[in-house]
Amino acid sequence: MSKLTYGVMPLNMSHVRELAPKLRRQDVQECVDADRTPSQALVDAISQGHSFAALLYRNDQWDTIGAYGINDAAVVRGMPIIWSLWSDISLPVAREILHRTPYEVKHLLGLTGAKKAGNLVWNENFPAIRWLALSGCFRFDDTVTATMNGNKYTWFETDV
């Protein structure tokens, strides 16, 4: 099994430069649909948060492989935005991340003081949808949808 290193820390420009060019195509599409490049989306995460908490993952070669976080400067439907951006990861690494997700989401919510967080996910971002569904700490609200650049999105929020 791959050894993961992770921690809650502020993202910095070094992380942006390392992660942005490696993002999964589905995450890149979500950035494009929001009129952002991957670098711009990550820079937004750095610059917009007051109680911003981010969880950064590195593999055993110390490469940045993904991050997710909560930004309470961006509030939608009365709750802060939770986001994630990942490179392609192996199945064993994905399983390890999935196992940790409920604890980490609770921790990130605690750091920001938020009771819930939510966001939209592109209906064809199957890796993200699988992570959201299998982690057991998110629920989808099919009554809240959006279309961006012709792509359909569905609202999800934390349920921990």
Image (tube, helix red, strand yellow):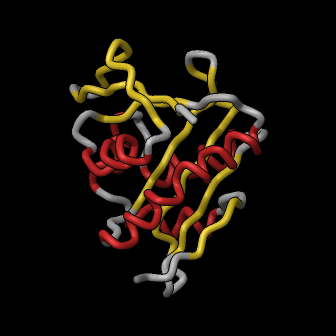
Can you give x and y, in whole percent of width and height, for residue 132 in the image? 40, 42
* Image quarter of residue 74: top right
Quadrant, the N terminus: bottom left
From the viewer's perspective, is 112 left or right of 134? Answer: right
Q: Residue at x 77, y 41 (%)?
A: 51
Looking at this rendering, what residue extends furthest in the bottom direction? 61
Q: Position of residue 128 (x, y in %)?
A: 35, 47
Q: Which quadrant is the C terminus positioned in?
A: top right
Q: Nearest the camera: 22 or 55?
A: 55
Residue in the image at 35% along x and 68% along y: 89
Q: Is residue 85 left or right of residue 44?
A: left
Left or right: 17, with 10 as reference point: left
Q: Could you say which is closer to the camera, residue 34 or residue 98?
A: 98
> In the displayed structure, does residue 63 sit left or right of residue 73?
left
Q: Nearer the viewer, residue 127 or 105?
A: 105
**Residue drawn at x 45%, y 67% as measured from the top left:** 96
Rendered location of residue 127, percent (x, y): 29, 51
Q: Residue furthest top?
A: 143
Q: Does residue 71 lie above or below 28 as drawn?
A: above
Numbered label tally: 0
Q: Nearer the viewer, residue 117 or 12?
A: 117
Q: Is residue 85 above or below residue 95?
A: above
Q: With respect to residue 55, does 158 lie above or below?
A: above
